[in-house]
Image (tube, helix red, strand yellow):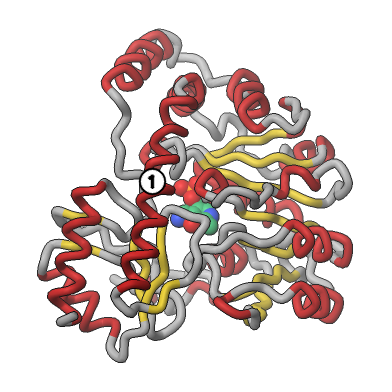
Amino acid sequence: MGVEDLPLREDLRGRSPYGAPQLDVPVALNTNENPYAPSPELAAALARNVEQTAAGLNRYPDRDATRLRAALADYLGHGLDPGRVWAANGSNEVLQQILQAFGGPGRTALGFEPSYSMHPVISRVTCTDWVPVDRTGTDFGLDAGAAVDAVRRHRPDVVFLTSPNNPTGASLPLETVAAVAAAAPGMVVVDEAYAEFRREGTPSALTLLAEHPRLIVSRTMSKAFALAGARVGYLAAHPAVVDALQLVRLPYHLSAITQVVAATALEFADELLGQVKQLRQERDSLVEWLRGHGFAVAASDANFVLFGDFADRSAVWRGMLERGVLVREVGPPHTLRVTVGTPEEMSAFRTALLEVTAR
Ligand code: PMP
C-alpha cells in the first residue's frame, strides 16, 4: 500500500515532504547550520542541567516555558518581557502556530519570492491560501512601493517578510517593514532567523514592535546559537498575539529537556555570539573572494551566500558533491547557495569550486 491508497486529504495528494538531502559528506554547507559544535564547557553545562531535569521527567513540563521565555526576553532586549515572547520547537513550529491562529481555511498568506520555501508549505498544511509575489528590486531586494501595493491589492491575513532573506541573503530596510506593517490589514511576520548575522547598521524589526501591534518577529536558536539539533524557535510580539497563540499550541509542546537546553545555551550567549562574529567575517571574505573570481554574488546579512551565474547549476552542484562539498541547489535558476562554515571547510569549498568551474 502506498500513500495514494490512503484516505489522505485531497490537497496533500501528490506532494513530497520538504527537506534538504541529509547526506554524509565531509563538508556539509547546505542547510545554514552553524559549523561550531557546543564548546566542552557548554556541553558539560547542558549535561549537568539535563541530568537534573531528567530526575523530574515523570511530570509534564512547564506549559508556559516561563523561565525560558524570561531568558529569551532578556536576550532580545528592547524592553521585552516574557509576556511578549513565545517559544516552540524551531521557528518552523512558531510559524505554524501563527498560521493556525491567523490563517486557515478561507484565509491567505502572502510572501515575496524567492524566500524561505517553508512559508508556502506551512501555509498549505494549515489550509491557508498562499499568494506569491515576486521580489522585483535589484539584487533580489524588495521594492517598498511594490510590496505595499501587493499588500493593498491582495489584503492577505498574514504577510511574511524574511529579513535577512533566505536564500538571497540581504536584510530589509526598516522603512520597508514599517511601510508593509502600516499597509497590512492582518498580521505581519518578520522572519529574522538569521538576525544575528546582519552587517553593521541594519536594525532589527524588534524596534518596530511598540508601534505595530500586529507585527511579529520570529527568531531561532538554530543558527546563531548553534542549536539546530535542539529545535528551539521563538517570537516577540504584542502580549495579545502571545495570548492568541495559546489557543492553537498543544499543551506541553516544548519538552522540559528542550526548555532547559535552550535556557542553558542562552547563558553562553557571549561565547556563541563571538563565533557569530567570526562567521560574519568569514562570510564577508567569501563574498569578496567569489566576486574576485567573477561570480555573481548577492549581498548577504546571513550565514550563507547565494552565488552564480551557472548555465547548468545542477552540474556544478554534482561536481562539488563529488569533491565532498555539499551546497544547496535553491533560489533563482542559475544560482547555488553555500552556508558559511569553518575556515577549513571554506577552503575546501573554494578549491572544489575552482576545479568544478575550471577558473
Ligand atoms: N526561517 C528561515 C528563513 C529559515 O531559513 C529557517 C531554517 N532554515 C527557519 C525559519 C526554520 O528554522 P528552525 O525551525 O530550525 O528554527
In which quadrant of the rendered view does residue 88 lie? Answer: top right
Which of these two is toward me, 66 or 183? Answer: 183
- Packing grade of label 1 (10 A; few <14, some 14-19, many >=20) is many
Q: Look at the image and tell me in which quarter the C terminus lies.
A: bottom left
Across and down, in percent, residue 292 comes to 33, 72
209 displayed left or right of 143: right
Residue that appears at 58% across and 69% down: 120
In which quadrant of the rendered view does residue 115 lie? Answer: bottom right
150 displayed left or right of 230: right
Badge 1 element: helix
Residue that appears at 69% across and 44% down: 248
Q: Is residue 5 visible?
A: no
- The yes-or-no answer for disc 1 within 8 Å of ligand 1 is no
Residue that appears at 22% across and 79% down: 316
Across and down, in percent, residue 301 comes to 52, 56
32 displayed left or right of 243: left
Residue corresponding to mark 1? 279
Outermost residue toward the bottom in this view: 311
Residue that appears at 41% across and 85% down: 333
Which of these two is toward me, 169 or 315? Answer: 169
Which of these two is toward me, 268 or 15? Answer: 268
* 62 w.r.t. 214: above or below: above
Total count of labels: 1
* 141 w.r.t. 282: above or below: below
Across and down, in percent, residue 191 comes to 62, 54
281 displayed left or right of 165: left
Which of these two is toward me, 323 or 232? Answer: 323
Across and down, in percent, residue 272 comes to 42, 31
